[in-house]
């Protein structure tokens, strides 16, 4: 959804630096150690695109689309600027207000406000410009047109329809959104639904201020109708790899962000949209892949020939061949695989740069192709 400041991550990967678009770049302070969700879980319905295996009859593209590109995990950023923190709130936990602020992205990007830990004076300024009513359209960063701002004819408008003064549950323990300009956050509600916020600011009294939010259903189709907080409108937490899956197996499609030079201002199901500034951004879309494209390792690739050396790399390769990856958003100059941050990481290589796993990912993505079915 916007330009990610990708330079530090690319430096870690030993690659060129760059930025992302202008309305998006998830971040989380991993050192907080408060995000949950290390146990394997099944998200979305059985027939969801996230849970469909690549069939033998799938059409496989002829081009290795990611060859030569840097590839890594969003959790590898040393400043924790790319992942989506995921929390769980219980029925007895506090309920707080959620407010709209049109400057919740730009003011943080400019360094005027912070995602959390603002001074009392700054919090007063945030509150003075906030409202308890979100825009009717409920969408600020996605479009179905490259030439005008157009939202899908039909999509989930829960956030836009919710009455002014709505409240949401938050964890009793400390929680924080991603620290970067995009400020993503996801909180599972006692109902089982998930609150997704974008451009999030958490005030000292736990009030949540955001540029956009939605309540998505982790048991539903997981498609763009959900109006998840990504440019594709897919749920921001969908397809993330969990620590426990390195032992049990990754049994779902994985989510990735890709550079704009791979993307075309188009979308394909399960995506419902693409970046609103796809062609006007300083780093415009200039490729051929629609948002929502599935990439995978062709069935003809023998995993043994890739000479993978890490357990995480081998599990990602197996899942890449069985399920593949879905493009959910625009990234920097490289490809980023999403990982759910963990309070107590079980697999260190999933949460801090690992040279061997990086080599494995490069070997995998050197053979990645578009698949359709």
Image (spheres, grey):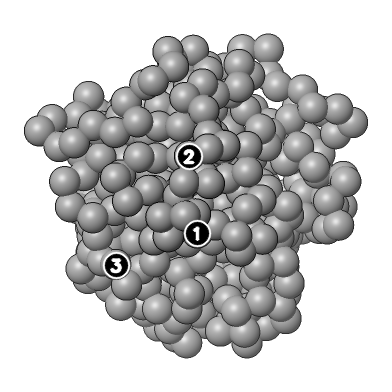
Q: Where does the image place residue 155, in percent across and percent down from the top left?
A: 57, 17
Q: What element does badge 1 sit on? A: loop
Residue depth check, mark 1 versus mark 3: number of the one nearer the observer: 1
In the rendered image, which residue does mark 3 sit on? 32
User: Of residues 293 and 4, which is closer to you in this image?
Assistant: 4
Q: What element does badge 3 sit on? A: helix
Q: Which image quadrant for residue 271?
A: top right
Residue 76 visible somewhere in the drawing:
yes
Q: Where does the image place residue 223, in percent across and percent down from the top left?
A: 51, 28
In the picture, the disc for residue 127 is 2
Q: How many marks?
A: 3
- Would residue 3 be found to the left or right of residue 347 on screen? right
Q: Where does the image place residue 16, in percent across and percent down from the top left?
A: 72, 81
User: Of residues 279 and 68, which is closer to you in this image?
Assistant: 279
In this view, 52 is above or below 305: above
Q: Residue furthest left?
A: 92
Q: Report the Cα–Cα distance between label 3 and label 2.
A: 25 Å
- Would residue 263 be found to the left or right of residue 337 on screen? right
Q: Report the Cα–Cα distance between label 2 and label 1.
A: 13 Å
Q: Where does the image place residue 268, in percent across and percent down from the top left?
A: 68, 31
Residue name at image x 25 percent, y 40 percent:
170
In the picture, the disc for residue 114 is 1
Residue depth check, mark 2 versus mark 1: number of the one nearer the observer: 2
Q: Earlier in the sequence, mark 1 or mark 3?
A: 3
User: Of residues 311 and 106, which is closer to you in this image?
Assistant: 106
**Callout 2 environment at 10 Å: few (<14), some (14 to 19), or many (20+)?**
some
In the picture, the disc for residue 358 is none
Q: Earlier in the sequence, mark 3 or mark 2?
A: 3
Residue name at image x 53 percent, y 46 percent:
125
Residue name at image x 66 percent, y 51 percent:
106
């Amino acid at each position: 959804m916007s330009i990610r400041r990708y330079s530090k991550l690319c430096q870690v990967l030993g690659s060129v630096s760059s930025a992302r678009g202008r309305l998006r770049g998830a971040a989380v302070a991993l050192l907080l150690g408060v995000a949950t969700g290390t146990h394997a879980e099944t998200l979305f319905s059985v027939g969801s695109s996230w849970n469909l295996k690549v069939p033998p009859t799938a059409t496989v593209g002829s081009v290795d689309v990611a060859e030569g590109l840097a590839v890594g995990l969003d959790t590898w950023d040393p400043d924790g600027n790319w992942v989506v923190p995921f929390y769980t709130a219980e029925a007895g936990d506090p309920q707080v207000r959620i407010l709209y602020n049109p400057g919740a992205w730009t003011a943080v990007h400019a360094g005027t406000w912070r995602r959390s830990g603002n001074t009392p004076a700054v919090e007063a300024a945030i509150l003075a410009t906030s409202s308890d009513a979100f825009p009717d359209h409920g969408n600020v960063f996605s479009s179905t047109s490259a030439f005008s701002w157009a939202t899908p004819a039909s999509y989930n408008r829960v956030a836009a329809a919710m009455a002014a003064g709505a409240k949401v549950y938050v964890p009793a323990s400390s929680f924080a959104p991603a620290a970067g300009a995009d400020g993503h956050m996801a909180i599972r509600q006692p109902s089982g639904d998930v609150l997704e916020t974008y451009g999030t600011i958490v005030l000292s009294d736990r009030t949540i201020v955001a540029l956009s939010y939605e309540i998505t259903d982790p048991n539903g189709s997981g498609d763009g109708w959900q109006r998840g907080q990504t440019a594709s409108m897919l749920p921001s937490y969908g397809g993330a790899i969990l620590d426990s899956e390195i032992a049990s197996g990754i049994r779902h499609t994985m989510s990735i962000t890709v550079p704009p030079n791979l993307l075309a201002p188009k979308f394909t199901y399960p995506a419902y949209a693409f970046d609103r500034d796809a062609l006007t951004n300083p780093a415009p879309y200039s490729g051929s892949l629609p948002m929502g494209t599935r990439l995978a390792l062709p069935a003809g690739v023998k995993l043994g020939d890739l000479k993978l050396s890490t357990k995480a790399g081998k599990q990602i390769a197996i899942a890449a061949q069985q399920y593949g990856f879905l493009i959910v958003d625009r990234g920097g100059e490289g490809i980023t695989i999403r990982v759910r941050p963990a309070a107590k990481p079980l697999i260190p290589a999933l949460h801090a740069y690992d040279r061997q796993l990086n080599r494995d990912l490069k070997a995998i993505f050197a053979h990645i192709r578009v698949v359709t079915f």
